[in-house]
Amino acid sequence: MAKFLTIWEIDTTRMSESPEEQIRSQTMMVNMVKEDLKRGITLDWGMFAGGELGGYAICEGTEQEITLENWKYLPYIKFKTYPILSVNQVAGMIPHVLAGRDMGYERKND
């Protein structure tokens, strides 16, 4: 199963000006994240320290599953999602990269 890194950010233009409503909506979203972690599609989740209104999530699934996970939080959260490789996947690629170089393959910049 593929893993994805999602960088998320709260869209402050969608936040209520009411402190009570902000607490209610953010508590609801954190509870949704806790459920995502229990279900196992979200493997890790965190908020950047220092007062930023963003963070990250590591999820596992198909492109469609991860997109559906992100859509649950629209329009209050903005996302950038990237497929990621594990250290073992990268290690497994190294011989292939070197073999490509030995065969005269050279990557050209566009």
Image: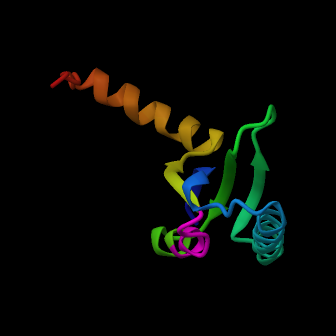
Q: Which quadrant of the structure image shows residue 48?
A: top right
- Quick check: 69 above or below 19? below
Q: How many marks?
A: 0
The quadrant of the picture occupied by the N terminus is: bottom right
Locate residue 9 relative to residue 21 in the image: left or right.
Answer: left
Task: Find residue 77 and report its horizontal and vertical position in percent.
Answer: 59, 60
Instruction: Point out the residue furthest to the front here.
Output: 18
User: Is residue 70 inside the magenta stretch?
Assistant: yes
Name the residue: 50% across, 70% down: 67
User: Is residue 72 inside the magenta stretch?
Assistant: yes
- Along the line of sight, the residue nearer the viewer: 89 or 23: 23
Colour basis: rainbow
Instruction: Point out the residue furthest to the left here.
Output: 110
Locate residue 59 relative to residue 35 in the image: left or right.
Answer: left
Name the residue: 55% across, 38% down: 90
- Quick check: 57 above or below 91? below
The span picked out in magenta is 68-76
- Quick check: 79 above or below 34? above
The quadrant of the picture occupied by the C terminus is: top left
- Along the line of sight, the residue nearer the viewer: 18 or 8: 18
Task: Find residue 38 and report its horizontal and vertical position in percent.
Answer: 83, 74
Name the residue: 62% across, 45% down: 86
Task: Find residue 41 and report its horizontal and vertical position in percent.
Answer: 69, 70
Task: Find residue 22 and report its horizontal and vertical position in percent.
Answer: 77, 63
- Along the line of sight, the residue nearer the viewer: 15 or 110: 15
Locate residue 28 relative to residue 9 in the image: left or right.
Answer: right
